């Protein structure tokens, strides 16, 4: 029974991560319970109460409120992945060297297809806010040097001196890196001056510190 309880609670944490990655708002107790196969909202509430007491989730309303949120400890409980650096959603930020910081995600969310590699980058700036990518968000990037037009990509410019995240469109021998914010200009660069390192496959919106 103890093992079953732990598995249910871990699946709840995984559901919250997947929901967060999809850009959805906090769920209700009932929605969390249904997502992990619990028929009783009361049972779901008891499991979430245990997670709250352990510091893995935070709730501010009643049982019917849509306010079940992961804490940083909850993210850590779901599995870890290396954070490779920062990526500029704008211009003027040089590529940041790889550090030893780590961030937590569910392994199944980051499971890479055979032969591919995924990693995380943290966003700096607001030029992609129209694509629901904000300052402080985490990008799950899959290595891909030839993504289709319209993909949100990580691009290396100026012989490796500048890296940015933008939406990619090819225009003959030029490549347009389109911003998703009316206050930022697109980048139009010769194809030979650009190296696409990967495409964004998930956007993670971590809990904001108060």
Image (cartoon, rainbow, N blue to C red):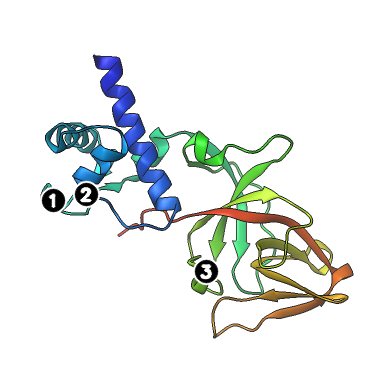
Q: In the displayed structure, does residue 54 sit left or right of residue 45?
A: right
Secondary structure at numbered mark 3:
helix
For residue 28, the mark is 2
User: Which residue is depicted at the point 40% across and 52% down?
Assistant: 20
Q: How many residues crowd mark 3 within 10 Å: few (<14), some (14–19), many (20+)?
A: some
- Disc 3 from disc 1: Cα separation: 30 Å
**As drawn, 189 above or below 122:** below
Residue visible at 66% across and 38% down in the picture: 113
Name which quarter of the figure residue 150 lies in: bottom right
From this view, report whether residue 1 is shown above or below residue 156.
above
Could you tell which of marks 3 and 1 lies nearer the N-terminus? 1
Whole-percent x, y for residue 167 in the image: 65, 69
Q: Residues within 10 Å of mark 2 (few under 14, many from 20)?
A: many
Residue 119 position in % (x across, y down): 62, 45
The picture quadrant where one finds residue 26 is bottom left
Query: Which percent across, then down, holds residue 137?
Result: 48, 59
Instruction: Determine which residue is flagged by label 1.
Output: 64
Is residue 135 found left or right of 10 in the rendered image? right
Give the SS element for disc 1.
loop
Q: Earlier along the polypeptide chain: callout 2 or callout 1?
A: 2
C-beta proximity under 8 Å, tags 2 and 1: yes
- Mark 2 and mark 1: span between their CA atoms? 6 Å
Which residue is painted at 55% across and 85% down in the image?
Answer: 183
What quarter of the picture does the C terminus occupy? bottom left
Q: Could you say which is closer to the camera, residue 149 or residue 16? A: 149
Q: Residues within 10 Å of mark 1 (few under 14, many from 20)?
A: few
Q: Which residue is mark 3?
A: 131
Quadrant (top left/top right/bottom left/bottom right) for the N terminus: top left
């Amino acid at each position: 029974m103890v093992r079953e309880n732990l598995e249910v609670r871990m699946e709840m944490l995984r559901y919250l991560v997947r929901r967060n990655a999809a850009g959805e708002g906090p769920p209700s107790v009932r929605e969390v319970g249904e997502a992990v196969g619990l028929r009783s909202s009361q049972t779901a509430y008891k499991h979430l109460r245990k997670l709250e007491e352990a510091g893995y989730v935070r709730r501010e309303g009643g049982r019917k409120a849509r306010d079940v949120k992961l804490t940083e400890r909850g993210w850590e409980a779901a599995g870890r992945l290396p954070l490779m650096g920062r990526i500029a959603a704008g211009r003027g930020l040089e590529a940041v060297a790889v550090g030893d910081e780590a961030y937590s995600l569910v392994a199944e969310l980051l499971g890479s297809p055979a032969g591919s590699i995924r990693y995380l980058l943290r966003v700096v700036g607001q030029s992609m806010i129209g694509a629901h990518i904000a300052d402080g968000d985490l990008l799950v990037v899959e290595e891909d040097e030839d993504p289709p037009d319209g993909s949100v990509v990580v691009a290396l410019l100026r012989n490796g001196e500048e890296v940015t995240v933008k939406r990619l469109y090819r225009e003959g021998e030029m490549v347009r890196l389109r911003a998703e914010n009316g206050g930022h200009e697109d980048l139009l660069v010769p194809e030979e001056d650009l190296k696409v390192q990967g495409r964004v496959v998930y956007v993670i919106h971590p809990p904001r510190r108060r």
